[in-house]
Image: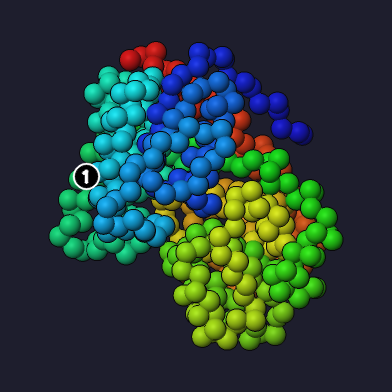
Amino acid sequence: MPDPEPRRAAPHRPLRVLMVAPTSFFKDYGGHIRILEETLALQALGHQVTIVTYYKGDNMPGLDIRRTSALPYHAEYDVGSSRHKLAFDTYLAATTLAVGRRVWPDVVHGHMHEGALIGGALARLLRVPLLFDFQGGLTAEMIDHGFLNPDGRVYPWARRLEKFICHLPQAILTSSLRAADLLRREFSVPAERIHPLPDCVDLDRFDPGQFTEEAKNALRQKLGIPLGRPIVAYLGLLADYQGIPQLIEAAARLKLAGEDAHFLVMGYPRVEEYRALATAWQVADRVTFTGRVEYRDAPFYLSLGDVAVSAKVSATEGSGKVLNYMAMSQPVVAYDTPVHREYLADLGVYAPAGDVACLAACLQELIHNPQRCHCLGQKLRQRVAGRYNWQQAGEQITGIYARLVGGR
């Protein structure tokens, strides 16, 4: 039976929304995609969205982006966590206050914990509601990134700060059901404040049918990937907690088993570091690192994949890359985590978290079964079309805004 036609939310008056994004918006990975697509969906519904963010990042056409000044002593910095982040956020708080008093929003929308903390101060000053876009646990992510020791003296204080931030907003969006459960169970956030809103995907942008075989073969040749070699695709941030070293080890295991698979690893930073690791594992001829792939080009590059993979093991962060894989009708091999199960259900091919041997075996099995790959890919695109589209997400956010503003 086909999915029913989605119900449209009742029309609401256009609102002025101030988003606080404590990151270098826009970059082609992770939470940046969520910020971008939420903004586009809200603008399509008539809302005026202003984004306050760090001084670096790409300007996107049609978006109102206000940036901080550059730090006088640290003009360059890498993507991801940084010991200079406190200074960045101090500048962000000052810029948010200045922009907020000029825009005078109807609602403040804070992304991530720092955005909710800074946005909470502005919301209280302007006496407007605050919505927190929760994209993963603060202390859990700091541990994942190696910035916090769970047995150290700072950890209890970080947990107290996290709980304080989680109780600031009148409503919280979570990128997964797992995150919603964490807020209720570990931070005692009232259930009525929590609104699960999984990451979504633009099905028109991520449409595998728009690329010809001739174009894909030309891209393969440009990247130096031999024709006929099956491709395992990864697109996202390059970091240890994303499982990049384990993907390289899986490539080595497949090569040792006599498989002719090729890993296409798309993203940044630390490209040279991981390229050196691939050389150490003797799979430099089986792994291609593209570096940064712009969001507009991501579907084309992803279209080369026969199988997609996610070796991320975080228990609280979303995994939006998986939705892009699904939209591109690609079968997905992933570590067995609640977030991956939420997206893929019984259509994913799972390996126990951290089990590289099983991960490689799952990839090997799919490579030799193109009929199963095709069947899974078609069903995954149908699943993502029915559950994870940005138009419905924009209407859900609008409904939450309306309730917050109406109950102010």
Please give the name of the residue rendered at 17% of the width and 57% of the height, measured from the top-left corner. 154
Mark yes or no: residue 226 visible: yes
Q: Name which quarter of the figure residue 386 lies in.
A: top right
Tell which of 41 and 58 is nearer to you.
58
Tell which of 44 and 283 is nearer to you.
44
Is 177 located above or below residue 239 in the figure? above
**In the displayed image of the protein, which residue is found farthest to the front?**
72
Under mark 1, the amino acid is Leu
Where residue 213 appears, x then y in whole percent? 83, 60
Give the position of the C terminus as an image quadrant. top left
Please give the name of the residue rendered at 59% of the width and 26% of the height, measured from the top-left corner. 44
Is 68 located above or below residue 104 in the figure? below
Give the position of the N terminus as an image quadrant. top right
Q: Name which quarter of the figure residue 43 lies in.
A: top right
Its colouring scheme is: rainbow
Please give the name of the residue rendered at 72% of the width and 52% of the height, measured from the top-left corner. 329
| Number of residue marks | 1
Where residue 14 appears, x then y in whole percent? 50, 17
Where residue 202 appears, x then y in whole percent? 64, 40
Q: Residues within 10 Å of mark 1 (few under 14, many from 20)?
A: some
Mark yes or no: residue 346 visible: no
Left or right position of 297 against 47: right
Please give the name of the residue rendered at 25% of the width and 31% of the height, measured from the top-left corner. 121
Q: What SS does tag 1 mark?
A: helix
Tell which of 395 and 13 is nearer to you.
13
Where residue 116 appears, x then y in whole percent? 32, 37
Q: Please name the residue that numbered disc 1 is placed on.
A: 161
Tell which of 32 and 345 is nearer to you.
32
